[in-house]
Image (cartoon, rainbow, N blue to C red):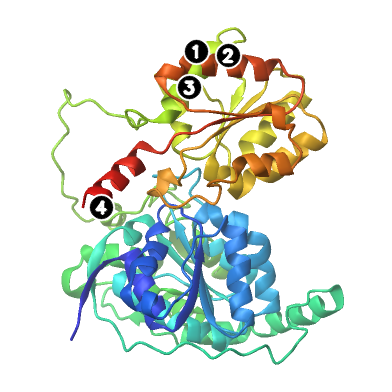
């Protein structure tokens, strides 16, 4: 039998292809990026001409995937957890409209914030939208859930949320694939008003969603991904969710755990199994990666009569990633001690690549801002966010995608002049355009620097939606063309860039400076490819 060695994200990509996928829609975001990249490079996906292009942002990706579902085809939309915030409007409403072709929304959470602004747990979005959620405990389950998730979506009549975390996304395991399924035929919805959320119809559709909750629970109770595992020691019952089950089993080789365990990988949580665990055991321990969703539920579910431990009472740390060692500590098992890092090994914080154009921008911007003082540069999410660290310490914010322009506008509205926004090319087309339009409409006194390295560099150099369009977009939303200025950020152009920034700061209105130079890593890859 054929077997693959795949990362969790690659297993999801392969599972989706084998599940009859017709289109994947996504915006790059660690740790979800490689799902789409795997599909983009997959031979079968290329032969079948599966849609696999990047979207401008997560909202447009979600809406396009819903459009494919409307046409009866199977679609997947992929993003990192904070990207689900961007897609939330369409995501929440699609739970009400329901689907036609199967639709999987894959959200990759990032506990410990390895490359993110927060630790939010996407399972809460699934609960909020009142739809089934799948959470694999290993790479094989990730594959199976992606492969069969479309069928589950069609059976449930709603999108399915597939939630993974960084460690599963970026660890590798052997995968045994199933038989590839054919794509759906083109088929319009039987109910032509299904996707029309005018209030009268929205109320009808919402009642359908509410009426299906018992069906979703039944699907969960009978899911192959949820199991009650017998144990001889009833002093403790363990609830292990998703990858937490894997961590539990690492402490008990050959599944020799002495305690009864409820493994949960499909939600809503299987109430019958949890009731049985509560009745049989003296107290409960909840192991889950992320927020205490199940622990909180069980505390309310069983009242005060049963002790429930986990993240809420500190048996498991409230913040950060769950690990096999943390699970061992929660169970009072011995934890192996690794070698102490020698004191002479210095911590090396992340830094911009040597030769990066963002560096040259910050050298010039710092020289100009020395006349005004620090605290006036608002930034965004991308490689250039490292400008907050030494040796630059240029920028003063990193809130969410696109917030640099709107924060600069708000600060200018408050009287902070000059007020400067630093944003990247891909982030600008992701979420910056509407903020620029607000600034133009109000003639805000801000200077917007769109640092253009011609790719989505932070996530691996994917093609930017902004490529070749930034000047025309800025002019299209109303920026005065004489105040849209382009320069190559390079040491030899330092004096010219300093002068340009000074002139545009002095302008009373919206000005845009575009330092443009190809990402040095992308340039090196292109050079190697051309040589090959």
Location of residue 350 with respect to 310 vertically, above or below: above
Pick the front one: 447 or 289: 447
* Tag in front: 3 or 2: 2
Determine the residue positioned at 54% across, 91% down.
185
Residues under numbered marks 1 and 2 in contact, where contact means CB atoms less than 8 Å apart: yes
The image position of residue 466, as x and y in percent, is 56, 47
| Residue occupied by mark 3 | 362
Residue 342 drawn above or below residue 74: above
Q: Residue 128 or 170: which is nearer the viewer?
A: 170
Q: Residue furthest right?
A: 200
Q: Secondary structure at mark 3?
A: helix
Callouts 1 and 3 close, C-beta under 8 Å: no
Residue 44 placement: quadrant:
bottom left
Q: Nearer the viewer, residue 532 or 51?
A: 532
Q: CA distance from mark 4 to mark 1?
A: 54 Å
Q: At numbered mark 2, what does the secondary structure look like: helix, strand or loop?
A: helix
Q: Earlier in the sequence, mark 1 or mark 3?
A: 3
Q: Nearer the viewer, mark 4 or mark 2?
A: 2
Binning the other alpha carbons within 10 Å of mark 2 as few (below 14), some (14 to 19) or many (20 upward) gives few
Identified at 79% across, 82% down, the residue is 204
Return the disc, 3 or 2, that comes first in the chain's sequence. Answer: 3
Q: CA distance from mark 1 to mark 3?
A: 13 Å
Q: CA distance from mark 4 to mark 3?
A: 42 Å
Which residue position is annotated with label 1? 495
Residue at image mark 2: 499
Earlier sequence position, callout 4 versus callout 3: 4
Separation of marks 3 and 2 at Cα, in angstroms = 14 Å
């Amino acid at each position: 039998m054929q077997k693959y060695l795949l990362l969790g994200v690659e297993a999801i990509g392969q599972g989706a292809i084998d599940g009859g996928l017709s289109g994947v829609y996504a915006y790059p975001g660690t740790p979800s990026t490689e799902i789409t990249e795997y599909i983009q490079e997959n031979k079968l996906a290329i032969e079948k001409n599966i849609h696999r292009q990047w979207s401008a942002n997560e909202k447009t990706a979600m809406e396009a995937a819903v459009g494919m579902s409307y046409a009866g085809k199977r679609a997947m939309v992929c993003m990192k957890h904070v990207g689900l915030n961007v897609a939330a409007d369409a995501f929440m409403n699609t739970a009400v409209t329901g689907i036609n072709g199967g639709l999987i929304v894959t959200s990759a959470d990032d506990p410990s914030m390895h490359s993110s602004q927060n630790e939010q747990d996407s399972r809460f979005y699934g609960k909020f939208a009142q739809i089934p959620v799948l959470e694999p405990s290993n790479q094989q389950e990730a594959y199976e859930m992606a492969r069969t998730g479309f069928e589950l979506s069609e059976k449930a009549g709603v999108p399915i949320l597939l939630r993974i975390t960084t460690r599963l996304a970026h660890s590798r395991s052997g995968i045994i694939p199933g038989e590839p399924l054919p794509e759906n035929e083109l088929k319009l919805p039987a109910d032509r008003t299904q996707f029309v959320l005018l209030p009268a119809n929205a109320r009808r559709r919402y009642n359908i969603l509410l009426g299906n909750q018992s069906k979703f629970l039944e699907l969960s109770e009978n899911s192959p991904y949820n199991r009650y595992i017998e144990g001889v020691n009833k002093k403790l019952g363990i609830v292990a969710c998703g990858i937490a089950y894997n961590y539990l089993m690492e402490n008990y080789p050959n599944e020799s755990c002495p305690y009864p365990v409820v493994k949960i990988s499909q939600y809503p949580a299987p109430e019958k199994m949890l009731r049985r665990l509560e009745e049989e055991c003296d107290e409960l321990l909840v192991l889950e990666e992320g927020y205490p969703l199940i622990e909180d539920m069980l505390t309310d579910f069983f009242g005060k009569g049963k002790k429930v431990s986990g993240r809420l009472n500190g048996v498991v740390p409230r913040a950060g990633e769950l690990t096999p060692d943390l699970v061992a500590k929660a169970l009072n098992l011995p934890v192996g001690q690794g070698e102490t890092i020698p004191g002479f090994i210095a911590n090396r914080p992340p830094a911009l690549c040597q030769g990066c154009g963002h560096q040259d921008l910050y050298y010039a911007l710092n020289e100009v801002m020395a006349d005004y003082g620090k605290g006036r540069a608002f930034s965004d999410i991308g490689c250039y966010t490292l400008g907050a660290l030494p040796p630059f310490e240029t920028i003063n914010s990193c809130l969410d995608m696109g917030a640099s322009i709107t924060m600069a506008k708000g600060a200018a509205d408050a009287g902070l002049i000059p007020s400067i926004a630093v944003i990247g090319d891909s982030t600008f087309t992701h979420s910056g355009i509407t903020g620029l339009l607000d600034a133009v409409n109000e003639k805000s006194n801000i200077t917007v620097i769109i640092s253009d390295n011609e790719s989505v560099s932070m996530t691996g150099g994917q093609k930017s939606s902004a490529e070749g369009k930034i000047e025309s977009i800025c002019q299209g939303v109303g920026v005065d063309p004489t105040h849209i200025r382009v320069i190559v950020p390079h040491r030899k152009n330092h004096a010219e860039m300093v002068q340009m920034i000074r002139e545009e700061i002095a302008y009373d209105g919206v000005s845009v400076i575009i330092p443009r130079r190809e990402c040095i890593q992308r340039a090196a890859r292109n050079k190697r490819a051309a040589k090959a």
